[in-house]
Image (spheres, rainbow, N blue to C red):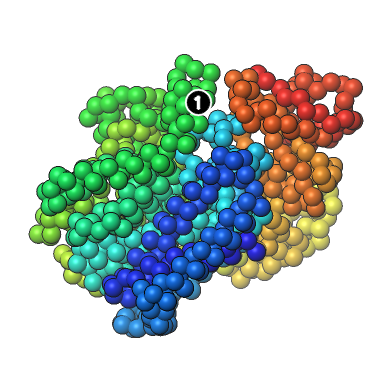
Amino acid sequence: MGIFLLLISFACIFTIFFLRSQAGLYTNLRRAFIFSLIAQAGIIFVYNEIASFFNAINTTSALIFWSLEALAMLGLVYYQHRSGQIDPGRLSELGTALRLKGFGRTHQLVIGFVALFYLLPLLFLAIYAAPNNFDSHMYHLNRILIWIYNSNLDHFPTMHLQQLYLNVFAEYLVLDTVLLSGTDQFSGLIQFGAFIGSICGISLIAKKFDLGRDGQLLASICFLTLPIGIFESTSTQVDLCACFFFIAFIYFGFELLERKSTIALVAMMQSLAFGGFSKYTILIFAIPFAIYFGVRILMQYRIAYAAKVLAVALALMAVTFSPFFYRNYSLFGHVMSPLRNTPFASEELPANKHSVRYTLSNVIKNAGLNIGLPITSFNRALDDKIRAFHDAIGVNIDDPDLSIDPFSVKYSVHEDMIPNTIHFWLIVGAGILLLFSPVKRDIKWFWTCSALGFLLFCTLMKFQLWSTRTQMPLFAMGAIMIACVYGLKLRWKAVYLIVPLLLLSLPFVYGNPSKELVSINFVTRKALGHIPIAICQSSEAVGKVYEKYLSEYYEFPGKDGCHPLKRWPDYAERTKVFSLLEEAGYYDEDRTSNIISMHRDRAYFLSNPDNYLSYKSLLPHIRPDRNVGVMFRRNVGFYHFWSATSNQVERPGQMDYIRYMKELSPLKNAQKKFCYNYVLSDDPTLIDSFIPKGNIARIYSSELFHLVELKQESCEKILF
């Protein structure tokens, strides 16, 4: 499979960095892994941009490029071996590392537990589970699909402008996995690799602050158990990828302060560029660190070297951003996003008002995303207090100049917005203790820069309910702070905090609602003997089945098809009732909610379950080698519809927008011929208005969507 070319390339780069370094074994392993991720990302960037320039982004060019690249890497390893620059004999040290030699028994047990119950299940999900994140379907994966159709990275006509101007580098990385494998099966490996790289980087920064193995392990576990990090590690989102580059930027910054190093300088600045290219907010969090590193470099190495550092930073930023900024500017007249008062005006993420009060408001609201508990009364009480505080300082809590979403305190186990409650309070406690702790100056400056980055984020960006994932850089730096205070100030054994964190976060590994490994709701209810106080039938036939098994416990017939429980039984009897309900098929959907039992088509739609039931009924009518034109009224993506089609049809055709803004018609990709045999629409009035009656063979309708089969293939677009 083509995906192995990426793995071979990565392995060769890792081998070169690992064998050339003179650091200790475990430090060397982590550094080599981080270097390899950055170098591989750079190679992917080069291929994507060059192939795009020649309209050659396709499987053939990807296979040729990566075959040559893998051969070149293998040749480089061989050359360096023959010339004595590396010693392959040192690879035997990897066996020593796998045996965790040098670690105490407690550390070995913790690392073994993490590998077995955290990393292996998450790796399995990253590969096995269907990518079903809402934003991924709306634009992350949707843009990749269209890039492949068009054979380039240029902007294209779309109903959803976020597919064009939002940061794209994480998608660049995913693109090559899709090209080489011909499937999205390995797309989750990008975020999972970033997850491992982030853990490596955090532990290495902790080492810079003189934390021993105990402290480094604690810092790693603090990030490993971060709920939003666990959820993102198997998704095709971009925040964890961006966070990895931010962590690498910080690590290599501290390494550069220890000694001049060209490779550390390039890795540092390229990480900053790739981090910002993945998510602009990374640049906000990085500003205080960039100033800190700049001042320290100027003081230590004087102006000539500081100028060199600045030149490298500007050059790498220019190389990284220029192609994308050029595409944005050519279409929108602005390098980053559409301007207000233009036809392309879209969501405004930067805050429009700035003052101490407004910053304080957004700090409180962003903190409020991480204080909710699964207790409604508690969340309401906190919500009321935060609203009262806003009234006291004279700020509208939902001011549209400061907020995208209405504020609320809640606890939502959702892949995009799960709170990091425990870690948040640990960071707050560590921050307070740090103020009064006699620790190294670098540690205090580190925490000051981390806090200032968060303040800048709250000042410059509007509040969103989804921001627990954009706050990940704060939690990454906070993991190091927790370890510093816990290890250097309190001097407690790390295992006393590590074990509770591992146990409390374990359910998030197996119970992500978007990709459950275990049907947690079903298993929990079965263990508790939790039965419904009434059962409702979906049809007369189902009602007869329920009556056959459950008439002893539920009243038949019931009112409006619902049959109430006659009396509340004790636990032993409830377990018997639960078994009868299970036998009658009452829990069939809950029991098969895990990703292993679920059909892949349904798994794609877990963020859009209503869409699945509606679209599923249309699938049998789409024949192989037929293109589908998407004519939506709403600004949404269609990746999940295409995925379901490609799984059902042996030779799926293309799916693309045929309705879009007329201002997008001058784009080069708008002139590319796309002819379709079906039209998928979410609005029957669009069908009546734009499809000639004489070209409609038949219309298949479901509750939410309409599939129009055309008599003759059409190539017409609908502009609005």
| Left or right of residue 427, residue 296 in this image | left
Q: Nearer the viewer, residue 83 or 467?
A: 83
Residue 547 rendering spot, x and y as whole percentages: 79, 57
* Residue at image coords 73%, 44%: 613
Q: Quadrant of the C terminus?
A: top right
Residue 619 rendering spot, x and y as whole percentages: 79, 44
* Residue at image coords 42%, 42%: 320
Q: Which residue is mark 1?
A: 330
Residue 599 rendering spot, x and y as whole percentages: 71, 57
| Left or right of residue 326, residue 26 in this image | left
Crowding near the residue tagged with mark 1, few <14, some 14–19, many ≥20 C-alpha atoms within 10 Å: few
Q: Nearer the viewer, residue 383 or 76?
A: 76
Q: Quadrant of residue 51?
A: top right
Q: Secondary structure at mark 1?
A: helix
Q: Quadrant of the N terminus?
A: bottom right
Whether residue 695 can be seen here: yes
Q: Quadrant of residue 389?
A: top left
Q: Compared to 341, does 118 lie above or below?
A: below
